[in-house]
Amino acid sequence: MPASTLRYWARPWSGGDPLITTTPARQGSSIPTLPFIGFAEAFVIKAAVNAGVKPTRVRENIAGLKNHFGKIEHALAHKCVWTDGVEILYREIADEPGADLYRGKDAQRQFSQAVKGQLKLIDYGSDEFATRLFLPRYGAPVLVDPDLAAGAPLLEHSGARVKDLLARYKAGESPAHLAHDYGAKEAEVKKVITAAAA
């Protein structure tokens, strides 16, 4: 997404509340830092928009979620949040099979069987908050985990950082050689390089 969109979600110039969590800017900078929880919140908003939720409805739904989950900070990064492509929805108990879903903005009940989980790319911890994300743009299992490689995107099974694959490829190494070095599949390395170079 454009950096301006992320900045707007962090600091809306329209005067509304921020949609994502940031921490204060580092000394000597005016740009706030985006912690992993804020990255997860942005990922959820982007997934909802990609699924068809209109940007104007995003803010309404987030405000409703904050009212409903007043005791839960960072509700967007919680396992209870879903989308049906029209609204952002929540489930009272995250793992309850067949539990009904409710519209974020006004708690109107929705039918769970009509909802497709757009957020299956998020893994949640025992506290039911996001712990790592899989990035769909690469077409290969590339993840972001704050406990691995300082949160840099990397191939799940080999641990190869995307930026390292791209740098070595640009230096003249073949995808086959890189796959061998990192113990990765050549097809996945090719997909990652193609997406990262785009």
Image (cartoon, rainbow, N blue to C red):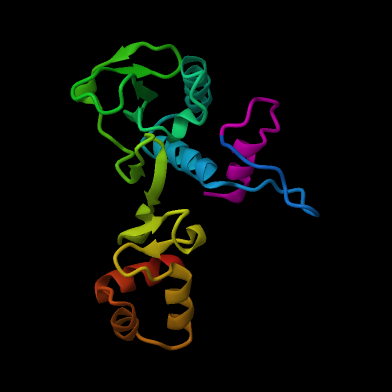
What is the span of residues highlighted in magenta in the rendered image? 1-19
- Tag count: 0
Image position, residue 101 (x, y; %): 30, 19
Residue drawn at (47%, 42%), measured in percent from left and top?
40
Query: Residue at the spot x=42%, y=75% of the render?
Result: 165
128 relative to 91, above or below = below
In the figure, 23 relative to 195: above or below? above
- Residue 126 in percent (x, y) is at 34, 38
Q: Quadrant of the C terminus?
A: bottom left
- Would you say residue 198 is visible in this rendering? no
Residue 160 versus residue 55 in the image, above or below: below
Q: Is residue 28 left or right of residue 79?
A: right
Percent position of residue 30, x then y: 77, 48
Name the quadrant containing residue 16.
top right
Residue 169, given in percent of the width and then of the height, sits at: 43, 81
Q: Residue furthest right?
A: 28
Location of residue 17 with respect to 6 vertically, above or below? above
| Residue 51 seen anywhere in this rendered image of the structure | yes
**Which corner quadrant of the image does residue 144 belong to?**
bottom left
